[in-house]
Image (tube, rainbow, N blue to C red):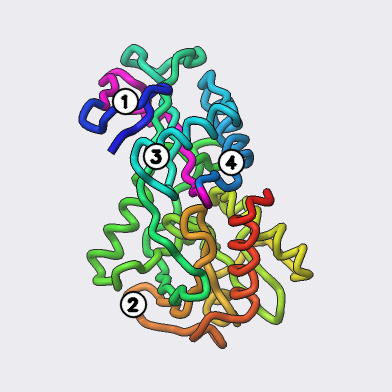
Amino acid sequence: MKYLYNGQLIDRNEAVISAFDHGFLYGMGLFETFRTYDGRPWLLEEHAKRLTKGCELLGINYKPDLSRMKEAIASLLASNDLTEGYIRWSVSAGEGVIGLPSEVYEQPNEIVYAKELAADDPSDRKGKTVRLLQLPRSTPEGDIRLKSFHYMNNINAKRELNSAGARPGTEGLFLNHEGYLVEGMVSNVFWISDGVLYTPALSTGLLEGITREYVLTLAQEMGIKTEQGLYPWDKLLYADEVFITNSIQEIVPVTKVENIGGRGLNPGGCNSVGSITYGLMHNYRTAAERNEA
């Protein structure tokens, strides 16, 4: 497998980053994950904008160029004999002295990974199980949550599920310290009650997912009323439909919701893929394959 390191194709065994890189020392780095359809990256401009904003907030002098990104992704897919790919575009702060800096990072490192994506038909997707986590969502380090290298909270959540004997593939859902629904370990969460699409507000401390934002826009275009707010766990339990989103898995229906300890509870009407969820899944994939955004 080959990677891009500061624009150069290298073999994975040759990938080396300095032990003094502040991405390693202090977690000062950001990344974006997205996928391709017919070799074209989906929602790339939105991912690039989020990456740019995050780098500005972290004091990393890095501005992605869309044309160069597209060329790099095409080259990376071709070098790995991939038709479609899961892309991770990472930016690390770069080498610095041991200590907490106040100046801008002027020489960041860019690392781009690709791996194969299996063909997937949304209409064949099976329902996923989600489970309430005991571990609360960590608060963002700044005003908003960044898609940063800091993933300890997520990893500890995954370990909690494994130690509790959760089914493989179960997605853990976080509450914040105030007891409101936030998001999943690697996803944003949505539910439908009485025809209204609900999702937690940004004020809960969630990551402003690119797919989350696109789904909200798509729902409005389909005439579905949407609401964002502060919601307790019970709202999810008694929803008519539930689904989760991320940029790789798109929209994934949920057919089982579990409380802490794995006590199974099926949201009302959510034992199979609901009609609104199915419509969103279909329209999302159609737009992605046409690359309309």
Q: Nearer the viewer, mark 1 or mark 4?
A: 4
Q: What is the CA distance from the residue labelled 4 to the residue labelled 3? A: 23 Å
Q: Amino acid at mark 1?
A: Leu
228 lies above or below 196:
above
Q: Residue at x 49, y 69 (%)?
A: 121
Residue at label 1? Answer: 25
Q: Which mark is residue 262?
A: 2
Q: Amino acid at mark 3?
A: His
Residue 123 image position (x, y, % from top left)? 52, 75
Residue at label 3? Answer: 150
Q: Is residue 30 magenta?
A: yes
Q: What is the CA distance from the residue labelled 3 to the residue labelled 2? A: 27 Å
Q: Residue at x 68, y 51 (%)?
A: 292
Q: Amino acid at mark 2?
A: Gly
Counting residues from the start of the chain, the first of labels 3 and 2 encountered is: 3
* Horizontal side, residue 205 vs residue 18: left or right: right
Counting residues from the start of the chain, the first of labels 2 and 4 encountered is: 4
Q: Which residue is at the front of the view, 263 or 32?
A: 32
Locate residue 50: give its quadrant.
top right
Q: Residue at x 29, y 18 (%)?
A: 20
Span colored in magenta: 15-38
111 lies above or below 100:
below
Element carrying mark 1? helix
Residue at label 4? Answer: 44
User: How would you rate the neighbour count of disc 2 (Cα within 10 Å): few for under 14, some for 14-19, many for 20 or more?
Assistant: some
Q: What is the CA distance from the residue labelled 2 to the residue labelled 4? A: 37 Å
User: How would you rate the neighbour count of disc 3 (Cα within 10 Å): few for under 14, some for 14-19, many for 20 or more?
Assistant: some
191 lies above or below 160:
below
